Image (cartoon, coloured by chain):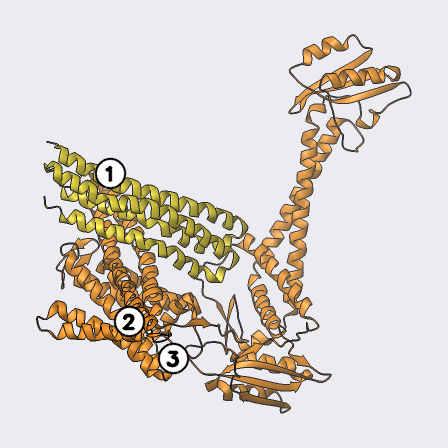
Chain colours: A orange, B yellow
Amino acid sequence: MLVPMKKAMLYALKEDRDSILLALQREGNVMLIPSAEEKVLPGAENVGNEVEKTHGAIKFMDMHVGKSSFLASRTPVSYTKFLQDTPEAAGLAEQVATLEDKISSLRNEAITMLAQAEALKPWLKLDIPLEALGATVSSVYFAGYMPELTKDEFLADIKDLTAEVIVLDEAPEGRAIVVFAYKADGPEVKHFLKAHDFADVVFPKRIGLAREIAADLTDAARMKESLADNLEEEAKKVAERKAELQLYYDQLIAKQDRMASSGLETQKTFFVEGWVRADKTDEVVKAVKEVTPAYDLNFVEPEEGEIPPTVMENGKFSRPYEFVTELYSRPKIGSLDPDFMMAPFHFIFFGMMLSDAGYGLVLTILLYVVLKLFKPQDSTGKLLTVIFFGGISTVIWGILFGGWFGLEWRPLLFAPMKEPLKMLALCFGLGALHLGTGMCMKMYLDVKRGNVWAAIFDELSWLVMFLGLFLMALLPSEIGKYLAILGAATIVFTGGREKKGIIAKFFGGLLTLYNISGYVSDLLSYSRLFALGLATGVIAMVINTIAKMLWETGPVGIIVAVFVLVGGHIFNIIINVLGSFVHSSRLQYIEFFGKFYEAGGRAFTPLAIRTKYVDVTK
Amino acid sequence: MLTLGTTLAFAGAAIAAGLAGVGSAIGVAIAGQAGSGVISEDPDKFGNVLVLQALPGTQGIYGLLIAFIIVLNIGVIDGNVKELTTYQGMALLFASLPIAIGGLMSGIYQGKVAASGIYLCAKRPEETGKGIILTAMVETYAVLALLISFIMVNGVKL
């Protein structure tokens, strides 16, 4: 059911603000409403920067120590410990950030140096120190690369000019050469070189022979690398203190949440508004009272036009199915919470679509273990519980249909593959029940809101007509026909009652009767219950058949067959659990919700301790 | 001895498995390409992306299913291939067409919706569920095709 919400209005002294928010955060009952004029609180930016820095530090540590596994249980931390300031953690984050910077800059420098050394490779044989390769009083030099292919032609042609050529090693850019000429001949040589695709080279600004420079660069690079390696070792040691940083990160996030909205302020006081569940108002008062007697706290009903967030409250069996509803959209305030009706249908449909008792057993046992060991929270926990329940349903339907890992064994009801028409009848029957329940829920909603006539004309008439058609097919007596006619007539005469003019009303009614095609297509949609169950069963059969064929080929075949069996059935379970969940949910969203559901609710996100790494115990 | 009918039945099974498989392959590939792009920006989204990529894969399975049932019914599995009349073979060939063509086209298009669902998940990770629902809507037609193919194949008495 949807929980009624109240708006809390709190006035208090600014000096108490953080303690009050801390107390409210601990209880997690109030969703703060941002006020029209929001101010950024002093220090909020610093906290934001700290969060970034800590996050980066934790990521860096993950690289060195390895990430914790996906479902690792979070470290429990007492609330008092959570409140304690940890200046060492701040220093640790700083230290890690500096380490990270140093390591990356060292490695980058090493890479640049090695690249420069590599570029000098073709020049190693040059006996002239690089700084001496400058123009002198009477000569100029050109150092660069010449295309390898035209080398011989080049050397032959250049003999015509007064120039000296030193030919060095090959490089990716071409053959390295140095050409000397008299200054007077400079332009002619330059022209000649350009005509022969000569490319200039730029040397690093260093002193000494090329080979000495290259050796220096390589040594320096190696030194930087080893420095970086040492720092990496240090980082590994520091990374062992990851838990401290994780706690610090969670504390920072909690602080950031508290500083998120400023509310309205005067010089000495502040005012905030928030949404609170109507049944939790006393707890909120108690939390504030414990901090200070100087406050003014009132609870009011939401005004016209204000939309409070949606909070759902359900029994233990239906609560995990809130996940299915939340995946679609939360219910609008004042509407119905569909979970208590949706849960049993989702349960049944999931089982019918997976429909193999063996798979159901595997799923149930596996998920029971996961739920007990890891105790996942919130959405993940709800999803896993839904699948856990689905596993139980699968076992039931598997026993009814006689499916055990693809083998057929004593179905309690019938085997769907052998009697497809009976199975389709079952699917459509359940579908009709599902649709009927949806329509009943709409009737209930209408009556609750006082539109009794709408309930009769829009829903009851359809139900009567369908009942009549159903009876017509089953019973030989005339009652079915009369009910159907009664229902159809009601629809035709009242369907267009919103329109003006008797002709328009009549045609409106006929048009409304035409909606029967919508109902037929909804009903046909339920055939997927059969189709998906069939898919699971036949794939399992295929896997078994292949394994049997392999088994008969000998000892090697037996080993391969075992792999095929285990791998194939696991694959089949995964694919079909996904399919069963998605389609089971889809049937709720489109066919069931389509009858009565009003979406559009907002999520309730109270100021609470949201932690990523630790579990705060009160 | 292989009659024309049996051969036509083989053709039916081949078309069912082949075309539906192509549909899924293309669909999953389209989704996978989108997924690689998203993961290159944010590796943590791999789980969500994988779920969306897997959704167009079901058409290939449905095609295999029909092919397997045809092949089972004509006796290939237990080694005694029956001799079908031409009409029986043609019936099985036609029976495989819904899942073949339906699987092919719905697989490709479901892949496109899955790819856009992956982009949705990149921008708004908390709404991945809606992307999954949008992708699953296309599946309806593959399911209907599978169903009618199954009923028709079952209806051919050999």
Q: Nearer the viewer, residue A527 or A273?
A: A527
Q: Residue furthest left?
A: A476
| Type of amino acid under label 3 | Met
Q: Which residue is mark 2?
A: A344
Who comes first in sequence, dot 3 or dot 2?
A: 3
Q: Nearer the viewer, residue A479 or A443?
A: A479
Q: Position of residue B42 (x, y in %)?
A: 53, 53
Which mark's residue is nearer the viewer, 1 or 2? 1
Q: Nearer the viewer, residue B24 or A305?
A: A305
Asked whether disc 3 touches disc 1, contact meaning CB atoms under 8 Å apart, the reply is no
User: Can residue B76 be seen by looking at this rendering?
Assistant: no
| Image quadrant containing the N terminus of chain A | bottom left
Q: Residue at x 80, y 25 (%)?
A: A129
Q: Nearer the viewer, residue A589 or A269?
A: A589
Q: Residue furthest right?
A: A137
Q: Residue at x 85, y 20 (%)?
A: A140
| Type of amino acid under label 1 | Ala
Residue A215 lies in quadrant: top right
Q: Which residue is mark 1?
A: B14
**Residue under mark 3: which chain is it in?**
A
Q: Which residue is mark 3?
A: A1
**Residue under mark 2: which chain is it in?**
A
**Mark 2 surroundings: few (<14), some (14-19) or many (≥20) residues within 10 A:** some
